[in-house]
Amino acid sequence: MTRQYELVYIFDSALEEAQINERLDRFHALLKSHESPNPVVSTNHWGKRTLAYAIKGRQVGYYVVAQFEADPELLGELERSIKLDEAVLRHLLVVNEGLAPVSAPAQQAAADHNGTDESEEEAE
């Protein structure tokens, strides 16, 4: 059973974009399976950003966010490969469960902020 994931990479800013893409291709190739021959849904390059604190002596990192579908069994090898690559300063892998449902109090607050009242809308 495949699940949707989101993976944020922070690469060493000294790398060229071609080197980063080469590493991404290598990492994402580990996700391919019979059920999902093209697992990567999207890859967004956020570019170079100043880090909040130094990581491995670096003040600037190159951020990339990837969204993909994969079997949970494949993630162990992916994370192992990422950890072994010294050019990856940090990474974060999370399950992408979509947008969180909006609760009733939040909907009421949004309606109040817009100047409307839900009870007035229902009466119409």
Image: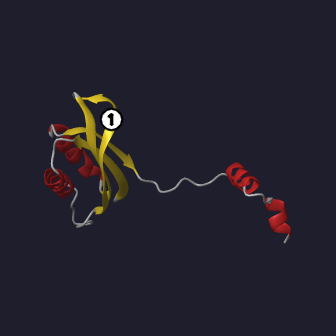
Q: In the image, 72: left or right of 37?
A: right
Residue displayed at 37% across by 57% down = 4
Q: Considering only vertical position in the picture, is 12 above or below 43?
A: above
Element under label 1? strand
Q: Nearer the viewer, residue 33 or 50?
A: 50
Left or right of 103 on screen, residue 44: left
Between 61 and 7, the residue placed more toward the observer is 61
Residue appearing at x 72%, y 50% in the figure:
109
Q: Residues within 10 Å of mark 1 (few under 14, many from 20)?
A: few
Residue 18 position by quadrant: bottom left
Extreme residue toward the bottom, this view: 124
97 versus 14 height, above or below: below
Residue 22 in percent (x, y) is at 14, 54
Residue 89 lies, in percent from the top left, at 23, 37
Q: Amino acid at mark 1?
A: Leu
On the image, the x and y values in percent for residue 73 come to: 26, 50
How far from the left and from the top, in percent, is residue 115? 77, 57
The residue that mark 1 highlights is: 51
> Colour scheme of this structure image?
secondary structure
Q: Is residue 45 left or right of residue 95?
A: left
Quarter of the figure with the C terminus: bottom right
Horizontal relation, residue 46 to residue 56: left or right: right
* Image quadrant occupied by the N terminus: bottom left
Count every numbered label the image shows and give the total.
1
